[in-house]
Image: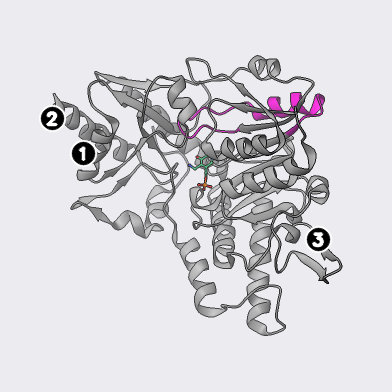
Amino acid sequence: MPDRTLDLDAIRSEFPLLERRVHEQPLIYLDNAATTPRPRPVLDAVAGFETNFTANVHRAVHELSAEATDAYEGARKAVATFINASRHEEIVWTRGTTEAINLFANSWGGSNLSEGDEILLTVMEHHANIVPWQLLQERLGLVLNVVPVADDGTIGLDAFLEHMTDRTKLAAVTWTSNVLGTINDVAAICSAARERGITTLLDAAQAVPHGPVDVQAIGCDAIAFSGHKMYGPTGIGCLWARHELLESMPPWQGGGDMIEKVTFERTTYNDVPWKFEAGTPNISGAIGLGAATTWLRSLGMDAVSAHEQHLLLHALKLLRGMDRVRIIGDAPHRAAVVSFLVDGIHPHDLGTFLDRHGVAIRTGHHCAWPLMDRFGVPATARISMGLYNTTEELDEFADRLVRVIDVFG
Ligand code: PMP
């Protein structure tokens, strides 16, 4: 099958990292769920700020500061357009998904939850969407109500409904699992939550890079995502939340930029979203993330999704055809992420051997310890595809995996 509508040669030529050799082999990078390589438009945008108009934002009257502020706020608009936010003031810059969830937990959670209130989570959450709630649980005496995962790595809507009670105040759910690839039916979950007056926060770290995202159509209250998993820089990400919700939330960190007026008697706060952005922000990161979203839009997220689904089917076919390989999870609706085990070979050994052959995969618990426990495994090997990967690379990976299996005997 052809690689759909993406011009893969042109796309691959945008990534300097793909020219690298690792252990004298051409790099095959299949760890995109951990972080993606950066394409030239992102590198150029970051270098443009760092080289040509380095200045702090929102602060000075001089030309460089005006240019930096325009680029920085322009990036916010680009990200808002990318997820179809109704206004760009709904985008709050954070360091990434983890910080976005911590912001929401501290600000919204700290002011809306009290003892006995329940938060609905799932067994497939990343630690970033577990531990902030446990910290709040300790402080406020909350109950974490955890929805189980079925053997095939899915969670039916019924399971979510069964766990929504009169005390449930928040459903904090991953959109796409970073381990199983499972894509949860977030529109249905959010609709059920809304009917019951439950606020919804989606961990969209693994959803936003892989297909069209429309926060208004999904009907969620907030989402969190990271720049570095969507071809942008590290150290930048976003909390998106409905404007009224952000308006109702107190600031969570104090300092410069988040204030309107400061006196020792009384301090007042800036408007949304700046009231959540204390201190000098990651300006180059924001500009780089804005460039990443503009670049992704130019490719077309439907085409990205179609290509990645094609890669997924190819990878599943290859892995299913191998003796001793067991794939964890079999969700019908899933992203191009596959966790697997090879009977008799530890995932770390697989990862190390593949690395010697220039193939980068991830092994370990993937920051999803409860999910590992659920499937009774300490670790898995995981391949995760990006929009620039090819079926030829997957064939090469499979070839090398077979060689590892043969070596270990
Ligand atoms: N949630 C999910 C589903 C993830 O895959 C990750 C990163 N592996 C995170 C949250 C945390 O993202 P970050 O480290 O960029 O904050």
The span picked out in magenta is 174-199
Q: Residue 394: percent from the left, percent from the top?
A: 31, 36
Amino acid type at image mark 2: Val
Can you identify the residue that label 3 sits on? Answer: 271
Residue 265 belongs to the span the image colors magenta: no
Tell me whether circle 1 and circle 2 mark residues in contact (CB < 8 Å): yes
Amino acid type assigned to the residue bearing label 3 in the image: Asp
Task: State the residue position of label 2.
Answer: 407
- Per the image, label 1 sits on a secondary structure element best described as helix
Q: Quadrant of residue 392?
A: top left
185 up-or-down from 396: above or below: above
Quarter of the image for the C terminus: give it: top left
Q: Residues within 10 Å of mark 2 (few under 14, many from 20)?
A: few
Please state the horizontal and vertical placement of residue 141, each as a whole percent of the image: 70, 32
Earlier residue among tags 1 and 2: 1
Badge 1 residue CB within 8 Å of ligand 1: no
User: Is disc 2 placed on a helix, strand or loop?
Assistant: helix
